[in-house]
């Protein structure tokens, strides 16, 4: 029987919002009723579903408040939706603040709704190290009925940093295979971007925060461009963009780098790309690597967090030490120049996504968590 499921996430661009929204859509397609309780319509909620509802969290901007009370407004909205829609499950993404808001909302509603919290990384690897927040994160985890994390590495880091008295299960991220797949029809894009036949295309997609080490991407690309004609697609924007542009200029790479800003149709960009670089120093999973691999683009990534659980070194891509420009460049150049190795890794990348991260398997894992909690009644 279909469940009534509330989902809270950050609805704006970001892997956690993407995963939460795609999960809601696939659960709705399986007959569950979904209630998004968020500050804006999730950006990936791009079509009409009869069984997906959106409840907007309105934050009071009253000037007396030095900080807008988002957390309290969310808890209050959660309480209203729990009561009115008789939620069975409330699935929140991020321990801080969402798990804590869920617990408060449940208490306000005097309900027995089951809370599932999914940890995505930043809540643990960045906020977890902030002693001002550790108790709240621990509380959010321990008071949830079930807690999942998006990689084994994140489970391990959470246990090390927070030491919660709670079992945390790994449920990997997934992509929508209908969107992220190899497509052949956009070859004209290359021409439109001014990419010559025979030029290799390297792509990097991120929010350009310091943890993504985008300047390493530029340094590696400079080494690649010494060996072969190549272009670099930079997709996304963020605080590091100024340093990135400066480095591109200093290395004389202006004509080789295309700044594409934030983009939606990534499958089309992957269709014209040969290699993806994900060189982060912290990354609980690396959803962008999975998206690229699903489109048949092998990746070179760093040995940070959950990246090696997605990119399997020497099988579907390469893993190198964080910041080791020489090793990363050598791996990238090897992949781009050995056509037999490239074809093998491309095939393995597609296979890995299909076998280890298939959306139907991952959604079933979440359903099993929900069913288990419902049976505990
Ligand atoms: O850091 C980001 O890129 C954004 C952040 C988010 O909130 O979406 O990403 C985190 O969650 C993603 C989805 O689970 C993961 O794929 C990212 O690896 C994770 N980011 C970090 O751990 C830094």
Image (tube, helix red, strand yellow):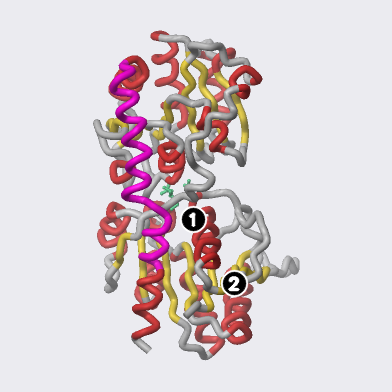
Residue 104, x across and y down, in percent: 51, 80
Picture residue at 58% right of the left edge, 70% below the top: 71
Q: Is residue 339 magenta?
A: yes
Q: Quadrant of the C terminus?
A: bottom left
Picture residue at 52% right of the left edge, 37% below the top: 208
The mark total stands at 2
Ligand 1 within 8 Å, label 1 CB: yes
Residue 65, x across and y down, in percent: 68, 68
In the depicted view, which residue is nearer to us: 49 or 298? 49
The residue beneath circle 2 is 35
* Chain-order first, disc 1 or disc 2: 1
Q: Is residue 312 above or below residue 24?
A: above
Q: Would residue 245 be found to the left or right of residue 356 on screen?
A: right
Picture residue at 46% right of the left edge, 70% below the top: 99
Q: Secondary structure at mark 1?
A: helix
Q: Is residue 337 above or below residue 90?
A: above
The residue beneath circle 1 is 19
- The magenta-colored residue range is 338-366
Q: Quadrant of residue 227?
A: top left
Q: Secondary structure at mark 2?
A: strand
Q: Is residue 140 above or below residue 220?
A: below
Residue 361, x across and y down, in percent: 37, 59
> What's the distance in space between the residues labelled 1 and 2, CA to CA?
15 Å
Ligand 1 within 8 Å, label 2 CB: no
Q: Which mark is residue 249?
A: none
Q: Residues within 10 Å of mark 2 (few under 14, many from 20)?
A: many
């Amino acid at each position: 029987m279909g469940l009534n499921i509330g989902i809270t996430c950050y609805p704006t661009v970001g892997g956690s919002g993407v995963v939460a929204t795609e999960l809601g859509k696939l659960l709705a397609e399986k007959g569950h009723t979904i209630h998004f309780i968020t500050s804006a319509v999730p950006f990936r909620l791009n079509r009409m579903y009869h069984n997906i509802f959106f409840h907007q969290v309105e934050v009071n901007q009253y000037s007396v408040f030095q900080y807008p009370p988002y957390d309290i407004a969310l808890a209050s909205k959660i309480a209203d939706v729990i009561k009115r829609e008789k939620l069975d499950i409330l699935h929140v993404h991020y321990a801080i603040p969402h798990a804590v808001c869920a617990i408060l909302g449940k208490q306000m509603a005097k309900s027995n709704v089951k809370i599932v919290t999914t940890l995505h990384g930043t809540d643990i690897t960045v906020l977890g190290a902030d002693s001002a927040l550790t108790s709240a994160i621990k509380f959010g985890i321990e008071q949830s009925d079930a807690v999942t994390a998006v990689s084994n590495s994140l489970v391990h880091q959470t246990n090390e940093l927070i030491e919660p008295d709670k079992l945390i299960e790994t449920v990997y991220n997934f992509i929508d295979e209908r969107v992220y797949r190899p497509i052949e029809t956009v070859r004209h894009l290359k021409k439109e971007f001014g990419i010559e036949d025979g030029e290799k295309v390297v792509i990097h997609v991120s929010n350009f925060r310091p943890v993504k080490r985008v300047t390493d991407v530029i340094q590696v690309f400079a080494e690649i461009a010494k060996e072969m004609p190549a272009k670099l697609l930079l997709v996304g924007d963020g605080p590091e963009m100024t340093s990135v542009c400066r480095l591109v200029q200093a290395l004389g790479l202006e004509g080789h780098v295309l700044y594409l800003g934030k983009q939606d149709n990534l499958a089309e960009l992957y269709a014209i790309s040969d290699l993806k670089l994900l060189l982060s120093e912290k990354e609980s999973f690396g959803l962008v690597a999975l998206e690229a691999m699903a489109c048949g683009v092998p990746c070179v990534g760093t040995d940070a967090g959950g990246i090696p659980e997605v990119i399997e070194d020497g099988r579907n891509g390469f893993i190198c030490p964080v910041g080791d420009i020489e090793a990363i460049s050598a791996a990238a150049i090897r992949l781009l120049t050995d056509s037999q190795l490239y074809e093998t890794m491309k095939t393995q990348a597609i296979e890995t996504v299909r076998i280890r991260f298939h959306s139907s398997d991952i959604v079933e894992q979440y359903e099993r968590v929900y069913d288990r909690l419902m049976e505990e009644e």
